Image (cartoon, grey):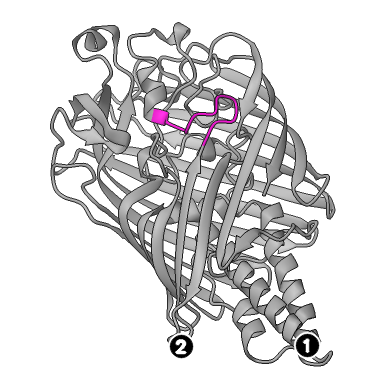
Amino acid sequence: MRDRTASRQLAATIAGLLAFGGYAGHAWADERSDRDLRDQVKALQKQVEELTKKVNGGQGGSAQAPKAVAEPSPPSNAKAPEPAPKTAGPPPISWNGITFYGTIDIGVAYLTHGAPLSPSYAPGLPFTLQSFSNHPITSLAPNGLSQSKVGISGVEPLGVADLKGIFKLETGFNPTSGRLVDGPKSLIENNGRPNNQRVTASDSSRAGQAFQGPAYVGIASNLLGILTFGRQNSLMADDLLKYDPQLQAQAFSPIAYSGTSGGLGDTEDKALDDTIKYTYAYGPARIAVLYQFGQRGTEPEGAESVDVGADYAGLSVDALYGEVRGAVSASSLTAAQNAVAPGTLAGTISDNTAYALMGTYTRRPLEIYAGYEHMKYADPKDPLPVGTVTIGGYVLSVVNNTAFKINKILEYSWTGARYAFNPKFDVTAAYYHFKQNSFNANHCSNTSATSCSGLFHDASLVADYRWTRRFDTYGGVNYSSAADGLASGFLFKVDWAPMLGARFNF
């Protein structure tokens, strides 16, 4: 009887592990890869080992269920040595292969040049210097380390070989307002306002959709890889969850704050509708391919990307190439434009190509990060018309299809390191450098136009302490500065943004 009870516990634990991990990491690729949450998988694996010993009379596990849990073929973004050891997380909230999860992240921040808190835009405040960064401000601040969210995921054995059906549904919200995250809505709230009167706002792939995080279904197999369909992270966004030293913390990483990097040039493409994604790993090597179905002259027009990577002796590297056709960069309307078409947005359209090379090296208790991304913007081969409906159902009443007669080149590079003083406490430092060419006919290198060449610098330092398996507190500071074309229209050129926050994961 005791063995049968242990067997049932083992089966339930394995189901919980698979559901939590979205098949060993894939279904949790989107932001759920926060370091402390990944340790919940380790805790479940330990329970599997202990229960296996009970089932087998105190001996090691058989070659059946435990192996399927402990040795899955990792997808493209589950590709690295784990960060320095942390406190094991609690078991997920799972039942019959369905897991419910979430994060709530909120704090207090001071900005030397800030703007009023947005109830809709995910970061809430301009932690990274923006054109509307204005007067000093002290405010509540959402989503400093992680996007606040709720979601469900699941796994179901299909009874054929090791095939399993998987799914994930997730949405993000602002804990300061209780609203679903909606970047385009924040832009509409600034329609007709001059820079010095604007609230915090920016475009985003999270546009108030019921599920503006991942929303997909698929099939997973150790031998054949993972195939998923639906709304999914771009491959670059998957990579940044690992190769960004600040792990996509919106208060401390400019490539997390804007989403431009993850979207291969435009933040609306950091997560993509209507996609098919395939990931496969063999030994230390892996490959991932993503294709977005689209149609010429509509939104989306389509995208594709491929990523290859490998892990060896503490070193992990990935190389990526991708294209996005008809990419949209939405912005607020001027006062004149808003008088004609209130409640709509302006859009700059481009065909983007990008490539990136990223790596990490881990030698306990230190992790080192580095990355480079090259993004090229060209005028779209298939222009989008006025009245195009972009993500979230927002209408573009002003459309610019000719902004890049001279191709715009935007280069991002970054480096950083994390040091774990003990399993509960670590400190991360990071530096980010952006460089833009002049895509203006006069080849300017000043602030006269956003098309002039320019530079942007950002540096951050963050300390994170995990009090329990679910609760941690953090403190840090972000410094950013802009020059020439990347500072065109800005009210100020420098910003300091310290923040203290707390995060609860379940």
Report the residue at 45% width, 62% height from top: 167
Question: Secondary structure under badge 2?
Answer: loop
Nearer mark to the viewer, of 1 and 2? 1
| Residue type at numbered disc 2 | Ala
The correct choice, above or below, for 63 with respect to 264 in the image is below
Q: Which image quarter holds the N terminus?
A: bottom right
Mark 1 or mark 2: whose residue is earlier in sequence: 1
Q: Residue 1 carries which label?
A: 1
Front position in the image: 400 or 433: 400
Q: Judge from the rendering whether residue 218 lies leftward or rightward of residue 115; answer left or right.
A: left
Front position in the image: 112 or 413: 112
Q: Which residue lies furthest to the right in this view?
A: 422
Number of marks: 2
- Distance, label 1 to label 2, CA atoms, is 29 Å
| Residue type at numbered disc 1 | Met
The correct choice, above or below, for 98 with respect to 467 in the image is below
Residue at mark 2 = 161
Name the main secondary structure of what is drawn in magenta.
loop
Residue 234 visible in rendering? no
Q: Position of residue 151 (x, y in %)?
A: 53, 50
Q: What stretch is highlighted in magenta?
A: 173-183
Magenta span has 467? no
